[in-house]
Image: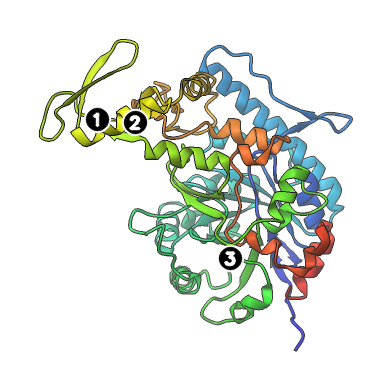
Amino acid sequence: MAFTLPSMTISGKEVLPLIEGGKGVAVSTGESSGAWAAAGGIGTFSAVNADKVGENGEIIRTVYHGRSRKERFEELVAQGISGGISQAQIAHEVAGGEGRLHMNVLWEMGGAERVLQGVMEGAKGLIHGITCGAGMPFRLAPLAAQYQVHYYPIISSARAFRALWLRSYRKFPDWLGGVVYEDPWLAGGHNGLSNSEDPETPEPPFPRVAALRKTMNEFGLQHIPIVMAGGVWYLREWSDWIDNPDLGPIVFQYGTRPLLTQESPISSAWKQRLMKLKEGDIKLNPFSPTGFYSSAVYNTFLHELYERSDREVAFADHPTGDHSESFTFGVRNKEVFVTRFDRKRIDGYLTDGFTKALPSPDSTFVFVTPEKAASIRQAQLDCMGCLSQCKFSNWAANEAGTTGRKADPRSFCIQKTLQEIAHGAEPDQHLMFAGHAAYRFAEDPFYADGFIPSVRQLVERICTGD
């Protein structure tokens, strides 16, 4: 029996129920999202520190001139707005009036509301929807309604949507275009695992999406589609979700597969790495400075973070209980106390060259080489406030400009590494986000012999069920 995918009205137009998931920091661009829309679906460009494009198509990288973090933050916001407008214009031109175009915004990014408003002002009429996750975007609905575009909150549980609806979205029901269920165990990038959920124990998506639908139906939202994001590869594997009364209207989002297309801006080295992944190569890890878990390819970059965490030692400011062994660290030779077992561990780290003890906000320190310590310190000094609050640098977008906690050396500068990998750096040395189904590139005959499809070829392939 042939697979059929019925079209659906989304963001005011009948289109294929296929969304290109937005991937931040210069990876979901106007070229890729415009091509997805031109193929009849919903393209999504990212407004998370998007690249500004010059008159000749050249990428204009941001050079920060501000000496303080607040000054650099203002430059970041200005660049984010101009970059988002550039990408919206490119997407509009490439789409040629077909499909729909959405903009993705990370709610926890620094200046999220200002960037969203600035892009919407500068690209009026070019954007049909806004997707937004990584946090609880209560302000998303009034902002979308202000510009008369549809909004698509990204959530990972029925409970999260209930909170958003009751507090804010019920006041703006006409512009709710859909609800994106992003599976916290399957999706790439940042994941919305709650404190009650075990990152090592995945839950199947069907019951969770059915629970979301039940909650939405309580609010009279039977007609609003749910977007399934995370783990979607062959649509034939999800055929029982289509026209299922327990789920209602369903749209499918693809974040990982669009990475491996001709229009995708990622480097050839990154694309070749995707083709060689094996099952289990994508890890759900706790290191992001956002405080969220995130899914990324296990490579040299992640390996170093895991090893760094293995060299973490708890200390006390005074002798107490088992913490009886003295240890001094830092330029002021601060004395702290560790257990006898940890003192032996420390001696081993020092012998192996990990001679710098960097304190964390939780009365622990991690041992790193002098070179790594200098790199961490420089990245913290270079902070430009890319997040609303950051564990790694202690930046916060408040009047004080700080979280009030020590910077955390167990994390990393996410802006720096994502900018580097997005603009051609060796992918093994940087954070390489990917969904947990990315290993299927190597198994899918569509990509045999290194074939890289155009976006249109990919969309046509997906519509066959494969």
Residue 256 lies, in percent from the top left, at 66, 56
- In the picture of the structure, the residue carrying the numbered disc 2 is 348
Residue occupying image coordinates x 65% and y 45% = 147
- Tell me the amino acid under the disc marked 3: Met
Confirm or deny contact between disc 3 and disc 1 (CB under 8 A): no
Tag 2 secondary structure: helix
Name the residue nearer the viewer: 263 or 105: 263
Q: Report crowding for label 3: few under 14, some 14 to 19, many 20 or more residues within 10 A (C-alpha).
A: many
First in sequence: mark 3 vs mark 2: 3
Q: Secondary structure at mark 1?
A: helix
Circle 3 residue? 228
Q: Is residue 226 above or below residue 353?
A: below
Q: Earlier in the sequence, mark 3 or mark 1?
A: 3
The residue wearing badge 1 is 343
Residue 78 placement, left or right of 212: right
Real-space Cα distance between discs 3 and 2? 48 Å
